[in-house]
Amino acid sequence: MHSSNLERSDEAHVGFGIDIGGSGIKGARVDLRTGEFIGERIKVATPQPATPTAVADTVATIINQAHWAGPVGITVPSVVRNQQALTAANIDPEWIDCDLSDVFSTAVGGRECAVLNDADAAGLAEVAFGDPRAQQGVVILATLGTGIGSALLTDGTLVPNTELGHLMIQRPRRSGKITLVEAEAYAASSVRQREELSYKKWAKRLSHVLSEYERLFWPDLFILGGGVSRKFDKWGPLLEVDTQVVPARLRNRAGIVGAAMAVNRGIRP
């Protein structure tokens, strides 16, 4: 089994992606022709504290467990520029200004690594293997989870590191006063759960955020991902925006698939 897996790693249409999250690190082989996993996804709990060295060692563990011998694509919950992390969301602050290529390549025996923002990876995957309409015009993918991740695409080309979840929006109050709040602090899926909002009330908040994105970017399509997208039929019809909204098709696969695509295509923000 080990030998055959190593041979498969040399096939041009097979890649390997790893998606680093605040609670779990997941990796899998990806068929780059279809966006489907080859074999089982491997998941390991994110080490605490989630320092660069600890996370990189966990990535190496997953690669070794999978007997993967080729290049590796990796997502991080961070703004990535020139393979350097500039922010740290749900991971240790030690990531800021970290040389990502060096950290991961050292941990995995010097093999080629490509690192990119997790929502950007999901956007790439949805363009390639999701709704065909994502390949044309201006498209905003928003991942609704602990925060709101975003990927901005124009005719299928990624504009990296948009971080629209941190956009400040005007929050209306019953008193008539207006306060400013980050989009993700107002309408992330975690906020719905924490404040025990009904889907109707949450959809109203999310509509407010998406309307602000409309006002600034005039998108042709919204793609909404994250775990809550599995229940899109319960809240999607309640959204009040002019732009067409569709649920992400790849769901939990998107980050891994996008990471594998990135290293295969030489995409390194």
Image: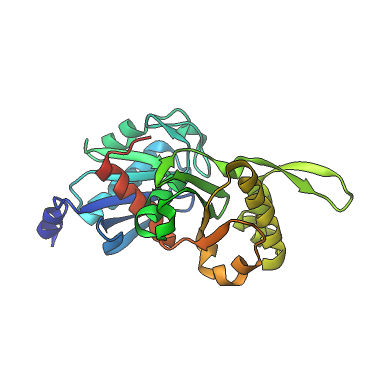
Q: Is residue 248 above or below residue 147?
A: below
Residue sitting at 66 percent across and 60 percent down? 192
* Location of residue 43 by image quarter: bottom left
202 vs 58, nearest the viewer: 202
Q: Is residue 149 above or below residue 82?
A: below
Q: Quadrant of the C terminus?
A: top left
- How many numbered discs sit on the rendered protein? 0
Res. 209 in view = yes
Residue sitting at 21 percent across and 38 percent down? 111
Q: Quadrant of the N terminus?
A: bottom left
**Horizontal and vertical percent position of residue 54:** 39, 41
User: In screen coordinates, is 35 left or right of 55?
Assistant: left
Residue sitting at 62 percent across and 68 percent down? 237
Residue sitting at 65 percent across and 53 percent down? 187
138 vs 115, nearest the viewer: 138
Colouring chosen for the image of the structure: rainbow
**Horizontal and vertical percent position of residue 205:** 70, 56
**Horizontal and vertical percent position of residue 178:** 82, 43
The residue positioned farthest toward the right in the image shown: 175
The residue positioned farthest toward the bottom in the image shown: 234
**Horizontal and vertical percent position of residue 239:** 65, 62
Res. 25 in view = no
